[in-house]
């Protein structure tokens, strides 16, 4: 049986990230967009299950792409929500401890990492994401862009901090001013969550 995915609830109220991310955007983004990925993933997996049962794999290329697209959307949004917290209540500030040390080692400073992450997030085209990832082969942090989120930019990396820069993530409040959204977003980054992901990824 194909696993059934469910939409995880937000770990805070819809208006908790105001004024940086508005309630209406959060309601649409979580309840409509993220739910769409969950439903799309379940639908693709059900159809693949039916294909295995019938032995008819005529649509396997399309369904594999659907599973990758919606599955990546579901996974990245599942990192994105807990990556944020209300300003002053877990959100904002700078990382500490081993995560801060690794950022200093791999980027020179937190300010360097933040500048590169913002620039990457501002520049990525289309259905993009900015990502801080753990690259387990070399054992270092990297900042990447995901231009099409179903095409992982480096296989095997573990996303630690992700920023959704699809227009649906900011357009109601920021219109075409993506850079203002990216700058405001740093006020709600949950570094404790990022540090937990870092610890788990590094093992
Ligand atoms: Mn999104």
Image: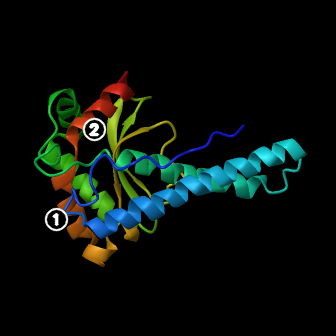
* Disc 2 residue: CB within 8 Å of ligand 1: no
Q: Quadrant of residue 202?
A: top left
Which label belongs to residue 19?
A: 1
For the residue labelled by badge 1, is the local secondary structure a helix, a strand or a loop?
loop
Residue 168 in percent (x, y) is at 39, 69
Gap between marks 1 and 2, in whole Å?
Answer: 22 Å
Residue 113 in percent (x, y) is at 22, 47
> Residue 111 versus residue 190: which sits nearer the camera?
190
User: Is 64 placed left or right of 203 in the picture?
Assistant: right
State the scheme by which the image is colored.
rainbow
Which label belongs to residue 146?
A: none
> Residue 182 versus residue 1: which sits nearer the camera?
1
> Residue 133 versus residue 108: which sits nearer the camera?
133
- Who's the residue at 83% across and 42% down the image? 52
Residue at the extreme top: 203
Residue 95 in percent (x, y) is at 16, 38
Quarter the C terminus occupies = top left
Q: Nearer the viewer, mark 1 or mark 2?
A: 1
- Who's the residue at 75% across and 48% down the image? 48
Q: Where is 23 relative to 52, above or below?
A: below
- Who's the residue at 14% across and 45% down the image? 89
Residue 181 in percent (x, y) is at 24, 66
Residue identifier under label 2? 194
Residue 153 seen anywhere in this rendered image of the structure: no
> How many numbered markers are drawn?
2
Mark 1 / mark 2, whichever is N-terminal: 1
For the residue labelled by badge 2, is the local secondary structure a helix, a strand or a loop?
helix
Residue 167 seen anywhere in this rendered image of the structure: yes
Q: Where is 102 relative to 151, above or below?
A: above
Task: Rate crowding at label 2 as few (under 14), some (14 to 19) or many (20 or more) other CA atoms within 10 Å.
Answer: many
- Who's the residue at 27% across and 37% down the image? 193
């Amino acid at each position: 049986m194909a696993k059934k995915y469910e939409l995880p609830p937000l770990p805070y109220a819809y208006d908790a990230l105001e004024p940086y991310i508005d309630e209406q955007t959060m309601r649409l983004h979580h309840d409509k967009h993220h739910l769409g990925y969950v439903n799309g993933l379940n639908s693709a997996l059900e159809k693949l299950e039916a294909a295995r049962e019938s032995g008819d794999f005529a649509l396997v290329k399309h369904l594999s792409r659907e599973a990758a697209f919606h599955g990546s959307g579901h996974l990245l949004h599942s990192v994105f929500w807990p990556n944020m917290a209300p300003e002053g209540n877990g959100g904002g500030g700078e990382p500490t401890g081993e995560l801060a040390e690794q950022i200093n080692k791999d980027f020179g400073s937190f300010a360097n990492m933040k500048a590169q992450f913002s620039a990457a997030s501002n520049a990525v085209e289309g259905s993009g994401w900015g990502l801080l990832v753990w690259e387990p082969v070399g054992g270092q942090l990297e900042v990447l862009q995901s231009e099409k989120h179903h095409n992982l930019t480096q296989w095997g990396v573990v996303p630690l901090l992700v920023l959704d820069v699809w227009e649906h993530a900011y357009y109601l409040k920021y219109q075409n001013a993506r850079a203002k959204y990216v700058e405001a977003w740093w006020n709600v980054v949950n570094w404790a969550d990022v540090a937990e992901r870092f610890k788990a990824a590094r093992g």
